[in-house]
Amino acid sequence: MRQLKLKLLAVAAAAVWTGSVSAQSVEVLHWWTSGGEAAALGVLKKTLEADGIKWNDMPVAGGGGEQAMTALRARVTAGNPPTAVQMLGFDIQDWAKQGALGDLNALAAKEGWDKTVPAALQRFSKYNGKWIAAPVNVHSTNWVWANKAVLDKAGVKDLPKTWDEFMAAADKIQKAGLVALAHGGQPWQEATMFDGVVLSTGGIDFYRKALVELDDKSLNSPTMEKVFARMSQLRKLVDKDFSGRDWNLATAMVISGKAGFQIMGDWAKGEFINAKKVPGKDFVCFRVPGSQGMVSFNSDQFAMFKVGADKADSQMKLAKAIMDPAFQSAFNVVKGSVPARTDVPNKAFDDCGKKGMADLAEANTKNTLIGSMAHGHSVPASIKNAFYDVITRHFNGDLNDKQAVAELAKAAKN
Ligand code: BGC
């Protein structure tokens, strides 16, 4: 009788134990709230749920992640960080420096991340030799998205390869009575266009000197003045309602044929795909004219925060799932980005995705791969935000081209 009682107790204990395992969960903070982004996030949620892990969603809308980072600071200050946080470049390093992030080294060693993740990403995923974040993708910012029917209607036969050809095509679209450039007037969106314009105007060495090394001579140069002159040209291509518009609503203008072009990172492709549009048929993707062969990249990584022992196992399962090659293919096909691993086949990707993968590989070998300033991969947030401010003030007519150059150089010194 006593033995039976003990047995029953053991069974009951096991049931409680299994119960607690199935109650495993992760809380994930992110800013993926547009249609395409939510669809991509759904792929990750489903993968985890299939693993028996509950997904507690913490979305904080706002492109570039500024609002998400503010929400994060509040949670960490309260001593209650989420399990994992979508994060960009220098922000990851900042949190690591503060000792807030966990240690993924055992998993990384077991899964061979050192060998499969490009060095340009590892520079942000590791701190003092320790893996602290799992990279889910590589995006790049120097892309143009165009509506094919609009180009046809406006009589734009060839895709523009130079800046002047781009301006000529934009002029034709305006003359056809349509908006040439779909844009949302938010600082991060203007900075995103700026990435591409700097590459196109000054080339890769200029970009590196000015926006990575913060070389004063490059910042304060005739080339930079030309960059701002080109930003002024772009300003004339947007519609009157651009102010404050979300990026995905600007993409929707291209999707619906109201506008011809959008200069935006390849998360825009996620919106086209989500709207069931086909690359090459309904829309086309090409590099910001003049920046062919160069890639300004940003990588969404999930920074893993220090969590209690009860959450450690599900956190590792999340990291493992993110780094799985099959998952990276499925996720990035929907997101518009390309895998953060070099060993994922391009088979499942559409033409823009295949081009993105090939461009990335080529830029990596030719040393024309560079961190996006607009998306936190060239300078820390304090300088990035000071740059945003100058670029936006200029775009809104508060600074002329010359003043903007001087202000940008000043901002780099802060
Ligand atoms: C992120 C993308 C995201 C985009 C717009 C970028 O900073 O890297 O994943 O889709 O912002 O929200």
Image (cartoon, rainbow, N blue to C red):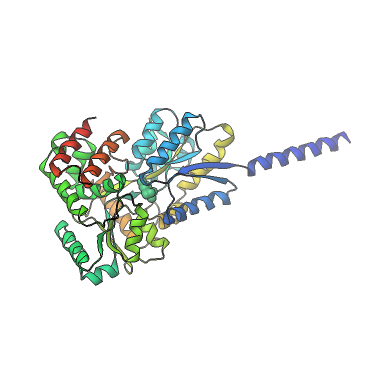
Residue at 76% over, 40% down: 11
Camera sees residue 48 = yes
- Which residue occupies the extreme left position in the image? 222
Task: State the image quarter where residue 331 is shown.
Answer: bottom left
Q: Position of residue 38 (x, y in %)?
A: 46, 53
- Determine the residue located farthest toward the top in the rendered image: 98
Picture residue at 19% right of the left edge, 33% below the top: 410
- Across and down, in percent, residue 52 comes to 60, 48
Outermost residue toward the front? Answer: 240
Decide which of 182, 107 is in the foreground and name it. Answer: 182
**Left of 76 or right of it: where is 196?**
left
Q: Residue furthest right?
A: 1
Residue 341 visible in the shown view: no
- Report the quarter where the N terminus lies: top right
Give the camera-side residue of 390 and 213. 390
| Quadrant holding the C terminus | top left
> Count of labels shown?
0
Q: Quadrant of residue 209?
A: top left
Residue ID at (84%, 36%): 5
- Return the x and y of residue 236 as percentages of the image width and height: 20, 55
Could you tell whether 166 is left or right of 264 in the image?
left
The percent position of residue 181, horizontal first and vertical second, equals 25, 58
